[in-house]
Image: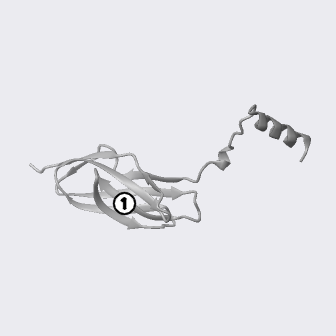
Amino acid sequence: MGEKASVTLLFVALGLFAPVSPAWAKKDKLEVTLTAPAAGALYNAPAAVVLSAIAQTTQKNHPIAKVEFFQGANLIGAVAGPRRDDQYTLNWTGVAAGNYAVTAKATNDKGDTDLSDPVSITVNALP
């Protein structure tokens, strides 16, 4: 060890220096973003809504295992992974009139999860 390393160790031992983690050392990340439908989208019942999400991970040894789509707490369906393009799409058909908040939840093969921000849509009843 050189002088710089010895001084740094002394500062750490005395509590005078708190090591800072560089950006590249941050924890591995799992992230999912709902890309469709668009927020505020309007449909007519019975609606066919395309749900689409991008799910990515920095954990190359732990790929995306599935992406689930939810309306509130209700599971609409799931798409198995991993996908080469990180794109997961599900067709939600026969959607009745109402207001809905949809989300996507990504899970990797170790069970880590991430939940997208909700997107609100409206399905109108036919006159």
Q: Residue at x 41, y 49 (%)?
A: 116
Image-based side of 37 in relation to 27, left or right: left
At mark 1, the secondary structure is strand
Amino acid of disc 1: Glu
| Residue sitting at x 45%, y 67% | 81
Q: Report the residue that reaches farthest toward the front.
A: 14
Residue 41, position as x, y percentages in the image: 28, 46
Q: Residues within 10 Å of mark 1 (few under 14, many from 20)?
A: many
- Extreme residue in the right direction: 2
Residue 47 coordinates in the image, percent (x, y)? 21, 56
Q: Foreground residue, 95 or 26?
A: 26
Task: Identify the residue at image location x=59%, y=63%.
Answer: 60
User: Horizontal and vertical percent for residue 69?
Assistant: 34, 57
Q: Which residue is more in the foreground, 124 or 26?
A: 26
> Is residue 60 rendered to the left or right of residue 103?
right
- Please name whichever residue, 67 or 52, is drawn nearer the observer in this view of the structure: 67
8 relative to 109, above or below? above
Q: Is residue 18 left or right of residue 36?
A: right
In the rendered image, the residue lying farthest to the left is: 127
Residue placed at 77% from the left, 33% from the top? 14
Which residue in the structure is indicated by mark 1?
A: 68
Question: Residue 55, percent across and down?
Answer: 47, 57
Total count of labels:
1
